[in-house]
Amino acid sequence: MSDTTGGPNLTQQRILTTAIPGPKSIELQARKQAAVAAGVGTTLPVYVVAAGGGVVLDVDGNSLIDFGSGIAVVTVGNSAPRVVEAVSEQVQAFTHTCFMITPYDGYVRVAEALNRLTPGDHEKRTALFNSGAEAVENAVKIARQHTKRQGVVVFDHAYHGRTNLTMAMTAKNMPYKSGFGPFAGEVYRAPLSYPYRDGLDGATAAARAINVIEKQVGVENLAAVVIEPIQGEGGFIVPAPGFIAALVQWCRDNSVVFVADEVQTGFARTGALFAMDHEDAVPDLIVTAKGIAGGLPLAAVTGRAEMMDAPHVGGLGGTYGGNPLACAAALAVIETIEADDLVGRARAIEATMMERLTALAERDARVGDLRGRGAMIAIELVDPATGAPDADLTKAVAAAAHQRGLIVLTCGTEGNVLRFLPPLAMPDHLLTEGLDVLDEVFANA
Ligand code: PLZ
């Protein structure tokens, strides 16, 4: 196979042939600056020619270890073989008809699979969309129709997207919201459970959030509570045990729709098919995207039939939602997760990462917290003396890792969280080497 073909057969090695970025990438980045809107930033401007397994190959011949998965998207790996085959077959058959005009069975099969795989054994329905933000918006539309109420509660540090409604739902001002208002109304923010920072147990943190909701919104005005079971962009915050279950129970008691935004946590990422599977609770609606289709744009809302069926016929849709290529990819992703036991693989990755990062945290007091599940792990970096978030160190560590050929991402409201999201197709030797690179970087930082 030629070296510019992606997929798992791409040479699984970290190779640095130039400085990062190399000369060809620098040239392309100059063209990008002249041609692409400045608002669209790039974290690590190496221009990609192929990717697969655990590496990303750039135009200068550098092969980088991928601890990012394109922000938790290529969970099954880049150009995963079943995805390539299914999409290639579909692209020859037809590329689009619009499901709202003349439908096709790929969409129905994805809906059936999601109804089967998502948490809870109640009767379910699914609707397909293009992006996480679009699906979150549709979950809110569905909850409003079902409850005949308007209010939406979200949480501190939440990330739900960049469209107008989801900007209102996202917590962080820069870079997501600043100057882009006015934002959609009827969105209210409640305090999260953030064990490292608030020290509260799940029940206490839930009682605090519920008090805010009852006093500041009022149950009679509330359509939905929307939460990421593990926050993604907000800092990979795992709520204290029982927090999510208490919120779900409160929603049930008050006829409020509980929406789990599993755009980042879904599809085996956390060592379960869905992060809600770790909680002793079942969401009413679950929003999925990213990992669902191995890199093709697809998103879904799945949930209780009586809620999903509340909007009138024609009330939900969009030109491309459930595009045939994306559906073919999703079916191949689901087959891959099941056939290759990627849930088990995510747990094995968790074990390796936790062992190595625990050792790092013990050696280096700047690692204030280590948290996450499966192949969704992060460290929060702080000033050891004060516990204050250290965004500068986080930026420096990420940049040094990039220089050494390791793709890592940062996150967190304070920008002081380094997150690791390797594809589950990553071979062990690259996972270990990536962790070695991190050790080196911390030793020199
Ligand atoms: N909900 C939980 O993580 C997307 C955003 C990157 P879209 N997260 C990555 C960026 O800077 O734009 C995300 C998410 C959760 C919703 C979304 C939105 O998904 O597919 O980007 O619209």
Image (spheres, rainbow, N blue to C red):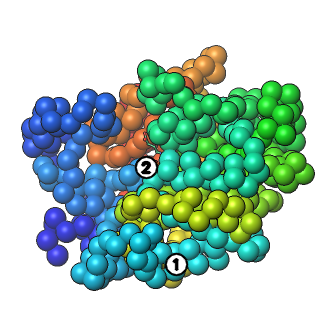
Q: CA distance from mark 2 to mark 1?
A: 27 Å
Q: Residue at x 28, y 78 (%)?
A: 94
In the rendered view, tell whether residue 301 sits above or below residue 88: above
**Nearer-the-camera pick, 225 or 390:** 225
**Nearer-the-camera pick, 172 or 213:** 213
Task: Note whether residue 272 is visible.
Answer: no
In the rendered view, tell whether residue 414 sits above or below residue 17: above
Tell me: 77 left or right of 94: right
Q: Residues within 10 Å of mark 1 (few under 14, many from 20)?
A: some
Indicate the amino acid at tag 1: Val
Res 400 quadrant in image: top left
Residue 150 x/y as whole percent: 71, 40
Q: Residue at x 90, y 51 (%)?
A: 253
Tell me: 272 left or right of 281: left
Q: Secondary structure at mark 2?
A: helix
Quadrant into which the N terminus falls: bottom left
Q: N-terminal of the two: label 2 or label 1?
A: 2
The yes-or-no answer for disc 2 within 8 Å of ligand 1 is yes
Residue 205 x/y as whole percent: 82, 36
Q: Residue at x 24, y 33 (%)?
A: 37
Q: Any mark on residue 413, and which? A: none
Q: Residue at x 28, y 52 (%)?
A: 64
Residue 305 x/y as whole percent: 71, 69
Q: Residue furthest top?
A: 386
In the rendered view, tell whether residue 285 sits above or below residue 206: below
Residue 323 x/y as whole percent: 39, 68
Q: Any mark on residue 71, and which? A: 2
**Nearer-the-camera pick, 127 or 6:** 127
Task: Note whether residue 280 is visible.
Answer: yes
Q: Any mark on residue 108, and which? A: 1
